[in-house]
């Protein structure tokens, strides 16, 4: 079982917040949907496309309330939390639809409320339900989610685990400068602000190098060192793991004491407020992952993605909400892990991407010993940037995808200008990922993963109707994700 993340005082505050939410929900039924993901997985694009398709009558054949005609109106409304920045849907959709550029990635928490008027499928429910559901979408960086396990770790455990991981594989090269500084530091010497700053800077540089596109590693706590925001330069973010002796305690006024105190401050100032004020109030959650990028970067990136998913899933308590649990300690009763960018593959490989991601999740669930109830997995594309075609080569038909590479993208030595379309063979994923994961886990030397072409395409050009209204954003399986995440609340 994961360690306890909160104190009894925290639990009391969470229970109070949940009681307030439920009281409000009696007047206006609401589901709080958390949206997060690991680096560059497309959280902003997912939310923008979901809202755009609901508002503009997108093709949603697997979202039963819309398909059956029971949804009569959809509108954006003011969010309930005045202290949380609004998710700037209008700006993001303008970037996607008008400018055909991908919006900036999530760097802080934001929120958006979309309300649906509907007719219940049950005559009995129509007598007692107002036929209205508000979905409060809470967007937050995946790095914040990966910080939650820190609440159950003391400074020694954090330091030992972080240094041990930094000494493995490609991380050993990326962490060389930071580890050299760490091992040279006199942890018993008096606390020195300049030493602390140098260690914190080197540690943050190591985390940034792990996150970079050419590595695409996923396990990167503490996440706020990558996204410092208004805490940049504060003592709570000026710390790093230290190479500690196997026993003993820090002396008063030592570097060790300073770092330990700042680590605890990080948990109190950064991690706990996020858990208490946002995460603990969620009803449903989607976690977006870029499994294709991990496959493209090699076995170590795949293993790191699995490690990150293990930490992520350990944070959730999926299960059915009873009245008492929903009031006092509500559970996230549905979690969806979605592999994004399915449009980078031919449809024949969509189920293979689904199976590969499902195996990653199953292995993570096994490692933490939790049940899989309430957890689903699928491959999707929030915005479909490509179309499918076939080309003939050597007398054989080859399935390809066609799209417009972003300006500066280079394919086969050819540099694209952001205007010209091209067709590429996207590569194949294995039919059965089991054997592949067994080979990755065995540490097989020189293991080559399936070759997948990960090309950065521009968002698609959308045609206009006769009235000048842009058609809804095309997608793959977004409707299926909606059905799982909140379709039952519109029954």
Image (spheres, rainbow, N blue to C red):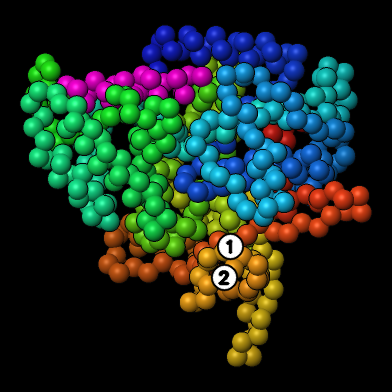
The residue most toward the right is 466
Q: Front-most of 342 and 198?
A: 198
Q: Classify residue 114 by image quadrant.
A: top right
Q: Position of residue 370 (x, y in %)?
A: 44, 35
Give me the disc on residue 406. 1
Q: Front-most of 113 and 349?
A: 113
Q: Front-most of 57 and 164?
A: 57
Q: Residue at x 50, y 52 (%)?
A: 290
Give the mark count: 2
Q: Left of 7 or right of it: where is 357?
A: right
Secondary structure beneath dot 2 equals: loop
9 lies above or below 458: above
Q: Main secondary structure of the magenta part?
A: helix
| Residue position for label 2 | 416
Sequence-wise, which precedes: disc 1 or disc 2?
1
Region in magenta: 257-277
Location of the C terminus (image quadrant): top right
Q: Classify residue 55 by image quadrant.
A: top right
Estimate the spatial distance between the alpha carbons at disc 1 and disc 2, rounded to whole Å.
7 Å
């Amino acid at each position: 079982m994961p360690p306890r993340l909160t104190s009894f005082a925290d639990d009391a505050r969470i229970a109070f917040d949940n009681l307030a939410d439920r009281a409000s929900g009696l007047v206006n039924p609401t589901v709080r949907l958390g949206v997060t993901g690991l680096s560059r997985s497309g959280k902003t694009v997912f939310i923008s496309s979901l809202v755009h398709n609901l508002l503009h009558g997108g093709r949603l054949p697997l979202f039963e309330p819309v398909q059956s005609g029971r949804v009569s109106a959809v509108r954006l409304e003011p969010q309930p939390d005045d202290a949380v920045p609004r998710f700037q849907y209008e700006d993001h959709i303008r970037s996607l639809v008008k400018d055909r550029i991908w919006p900036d990635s999530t760097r802080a928490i934001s929120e958006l409320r979309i309300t649906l008027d509907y007719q219940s499928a049950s005559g009995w429910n129509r007598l007692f339900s107002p036929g209205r559901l508000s979905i409060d979408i809470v967007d937050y960086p995946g790095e914040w989610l990966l910080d939650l396990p820190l609440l159950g770790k003391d400074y020694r455990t954090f330091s030992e685990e972080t240094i041990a991981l930094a000494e493995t594989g490609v991380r050993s090269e990326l962490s060389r400068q930071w580890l050299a500084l760490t091992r040279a530091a006199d942890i018993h010497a008096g606390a020195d602000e300049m030493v602390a700053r140098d260690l914190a800077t080197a540690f943050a540089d190591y985390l940034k190098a792990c996150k970079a596109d050419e590595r695409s590693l996923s396990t990167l706590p503490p996440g706020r060192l990558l996204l410092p925001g208004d805490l940049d330069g504060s003592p709570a973010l000026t710390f790093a793991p230290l190479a500690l002796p196997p026993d003993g305690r820090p002396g008063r006024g030592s570097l060790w004491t300073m770092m330990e105190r700042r680590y605890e401050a990080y948990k109190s100032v950064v991690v706990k407020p996020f858990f208490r004020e946002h995460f603990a109030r969620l009803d449903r959650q989607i976690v977006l992952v870029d499994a294709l990028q991990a496959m493209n970067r090699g076995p170590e990136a795949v293993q790191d993605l699995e490690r990150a998913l293990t930490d992520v899933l350990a944070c959730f308590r999926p299960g059915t909400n009873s009245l008492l649990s929903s009031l006092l300690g509500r559970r996230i009763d549905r979690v969806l892990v979605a592999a994004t960018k399915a449009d980078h593959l031919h449809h024949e490989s969509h189920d293979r991407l689904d199976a590969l991601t499902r195996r990653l999740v199953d292995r993570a669930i096994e490692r933490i010993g939790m049940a899989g109830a309430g957890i689903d997995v699928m491959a999707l594309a929030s915005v479909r940037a490509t179309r499918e075609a076939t080309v003939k080569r050597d007398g054989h038909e080859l399935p390809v995808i066609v799209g417009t590479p972003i300006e500066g993208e280079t394919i086969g030595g050819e540099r694209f200008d952001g205007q010209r379309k091209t067709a590429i063979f996207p590569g194949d994923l294995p039919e059965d990922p089991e054997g592949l994961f067994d080979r990755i886990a065995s540490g097989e030397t020189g293991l080559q993963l399936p070759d997948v072409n990960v090309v950065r395409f521009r968002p698609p050009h959308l045609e206009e109707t006769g009235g000048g209204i842009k058609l809804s954003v095309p997608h793959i399986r977004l409707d299926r994700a909606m059905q799982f995440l909140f379709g039952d609340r519109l029954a």
